[in-house]
Image (spheres, rainbow, N blue to C red):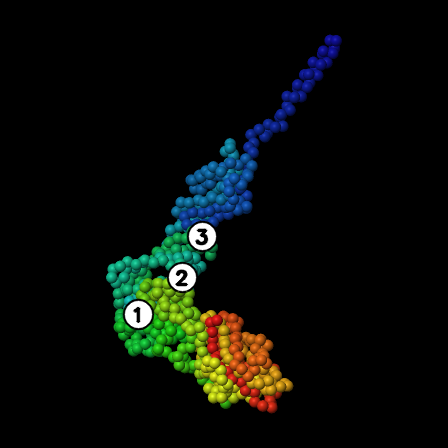
């Protein structure tokens, strides 16, 4: 019994001795800290006296969507500053960076025991007032008259140094009244009522976004400069853009004094520029219809021993200017309307491409839209002998026809005897004009076709018409700077039914295909150009009347 007690005592001593060092291996870790998680990126963006720093590859997400383990707060350190943010954030905005120097930022997280994560570091130089002082703005172009000025930037205001956003300006006129204005993407502005021969100071504040290494900074900033405008005297000559137009209005002396008595100007629809109105200090009314001062221009064809001249006389309602007036050439009108200097404008819709500019002034009565007739008859001085294009177009045309069959309300009747296989006649406008298909959507006319006996055998092909539209005849490419833009109607759509022979029949051509084109020529072919020879046993005689453009 005694020996068993001694054994267990020795065993216990041995076991306890062994336990004395069982935690010795953990001693070397007893002072270690488990760091909180860090942000996974750092990307800087420069602003005006500030920077923004992105901290997460996932982008700018709300704090409640961020999980970085034990991390609880965000710490930003730079210089002697320490910013504590009581949450985890995906980006930070650091303001008050007024010094033009390199700032080094350390950003890390901490847990509830203030244990720090591994920091991210980034060095950034903010945009400051010293950078603003070095900005350079493109110089404006200044157009002056004795009483007004236009300021614009033909090459724009944005550059490798900055992106332009907007501007404001202010000046004092000759009566001591201060004026202010603002401009957006279109930076041009107009300042009237200036003292002739004297300098005027214009204060311009630009709203711009500077660039660093061709990258825009985060913020737009104001940048203010002064512009000194020197106006000429009232006796200083100006060079007109539309001298013939001004002379037709009675202008003989091209100075402000010389035009001071003129309060109204009339422009033809084919005018190319309205810039000259800038020099008329007392202009109140503008007539853009041509009025009684201007006739249609003319165009002559001379080829294959055939000669035709189109145009002349009064403006025809179905004609519009061949191309929209360039916006730069109409800008002065916009300036004077905005400033209230122009009190009345007369305009025919869709004739000069000024509709968008003028429409805001219609309701107030400043702009009068001239009403055109529902139908516009084509005068016979727009008829062209088709032989000028090719002898295969030959017709004998008698205008006016003296032996035409009786009909109701017939106008501009002419007789056409087919003399060659592709017999055609042409209707054309002078090169300054095109068909106003925005207003007049259809070409209509009356045709009287001969008896069925005229269309026997191979000549049954000539019992149809084929209207063709284009900017110029094939042999006269010099008559359009827009190419030919030709389009043909479907020949079968204009087959003349047997029941319509020997009677006046109405024909309608839909002009929707011409929208957006510069068409000013119609070739009216008989037969569809499908025959190789032409020797009918008897004359094939057609009569045409009432060629007109219609709105419906």
* 240 vs 93, nearest the viewer: 240
Q: Earlier in the sequence, mark 2 or mark 3?
A: 2
Residue 473 position within the rendered picture, expressed as x and y whole percent measured from the top left = 51, 80
In the rendered image, the residue lying farthest to the left is 175
**Residue holding disc 2:** 186
Q: Quadrant of the N terminus?
A: top right
Q: Residues within 10 Å of mark 2 (few under 14, many from 20)?
A: few
Q: Which residue is mark 3?
A: 217
* Residue 128 visible within the image: yes
Alpha carbon separation for disc pair 3 and 1: 46 Å
Q: Nearer the viewer, residue 116 or 303?
A: 303
Of the two numbered discs 3 and 1 in the rendering, the one whose residue sits closer to the viewer: 1
Residue shown at the point (37%, 55%) measured from the top left: 223
Q: Of the two numbered discs 3 and 1 on the same chain, state the one appearing first in sequence.
A: 3
Left or right: 25 in relation to 196: right
Residue 413 screen position, x and y as percent: 48, 84
Q: Is residue 329 above or below residue 546?
A: above
Viewer-nearest of discs 2 and 3: 2
Which residue is tagged 1? 283
Q: Residue at x 54, y 35 (%)?
A: 70
Q: Secondary structure at mark 2?
A: loop
The circle on residue 10 is none
User: Separation of disc 2 and disc 3 at Cα?
Assistant: 22 Å
């Amino acid at each position: 019994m005694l020996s068993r007690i001694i054994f267990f005592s020795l065993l216990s001593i041995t076991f306890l001795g062994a336990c004395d060092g069982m935690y010795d291996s953990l001693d070397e870790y007893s002072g270690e800290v488990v760091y909180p998680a860090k942000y996974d990126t750092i990307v800087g963006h420069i602003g005006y006296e500030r920077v923004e720093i992105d901290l997460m590859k996932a982008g700018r997400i709300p704090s409640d969507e961020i999980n970085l383990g034990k991390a609880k707060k965000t710490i930003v350190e730079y210089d002697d500053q320490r910013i504590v943010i009581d949450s985890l954030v995906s980006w930070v905005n650091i303001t008050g960076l007024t010094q033009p120097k390199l700032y080094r930022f350390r950003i890390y997280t901490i847990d509830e025991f203030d244990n720090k994560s591994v920091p991210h570091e980034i060095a950034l130089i903010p945009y400051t007032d010293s950078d603003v002082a070095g900005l350079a703005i493109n110089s404006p172009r200044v157009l002056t008259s004795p009483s007004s000025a236009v300021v614009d930037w033909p090459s724009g205001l944005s550059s490798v140094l900055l992106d332009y956003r907007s501007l404001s300006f202010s000046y004092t006129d000759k009566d001591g009244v201060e004026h202010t204005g603002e401009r957006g993407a279109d930076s041009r502005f107009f300042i009237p009522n200036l003292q002739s021969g004297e300098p005027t100071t214009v204060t311009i504040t630009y709203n711009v976004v500077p660039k660093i290494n061709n990258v825009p900074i985060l913020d737009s900033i104001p940048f203010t400069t002064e512009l000194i405008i020197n106006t000429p005297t009232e006796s200083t000559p100006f060079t007109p853009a539309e001298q013939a137009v001004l002379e037709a209005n009675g202008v003989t002396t091209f100075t402000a004094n010389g035009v001071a008595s003129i309060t109204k100007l009339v422009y033809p629809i084919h005018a190319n520029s309205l810039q000259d109105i800038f020099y008329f200090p007392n202009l109140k009314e503008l007539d853009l219809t041509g009025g009684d001062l201007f006739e249609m221009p003319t165009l002559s064809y001379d080829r294959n021993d055939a000669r035709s001249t189109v145009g002349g006389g009064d403006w025809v309602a179905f004609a519009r200017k061949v191309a929209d007036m360039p916006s730069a050439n109409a800008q002065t009108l916009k300036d004077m309307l905005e400033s209230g200097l122009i009190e009345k404008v007369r305009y025919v819709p869709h004739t000069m491409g000024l509709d968008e500019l003028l429409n805001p002034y219609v309701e107030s009565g400043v702009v009068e839209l001239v009403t055109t007739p529902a139908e516009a008859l084509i005068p016979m001085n727009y008829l062209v002998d088709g032989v000028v294009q090719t002898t295969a177009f030959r017709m004998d045309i008698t205008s006016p026809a003296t032996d035409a069959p009786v009909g109701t309300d017939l106008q501009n009747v002419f007789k056409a005897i087919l003399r060659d296989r592709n017999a055609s006649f042409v209707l054309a406008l002078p090169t300054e004009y095109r068909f106003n298909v925005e207003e007049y959507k259809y070409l209509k006319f009356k045709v009287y076709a001969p008896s069925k006996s005229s269309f026997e055998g191979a000549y049954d092909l000539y019992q149809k018409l084929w209207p063709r539209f284009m900017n110029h005849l094939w042999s006269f490419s010099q008559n359009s700077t827009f190419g030919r833009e030709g389009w043909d109607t479907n020949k079968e759509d204009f087959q003349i039914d047997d029941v319509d022979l020997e009677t006046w029949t109405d024909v309608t051509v839909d002009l929707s295909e011409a929208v957006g084109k510069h068409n000013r020529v119609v070739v009216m072919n008989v037969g569809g150009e499908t025959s190789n020879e032409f020797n009918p046993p008897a004359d094939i005689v057609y009569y045409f009347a009432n060629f007109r453009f219609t709105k419906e």
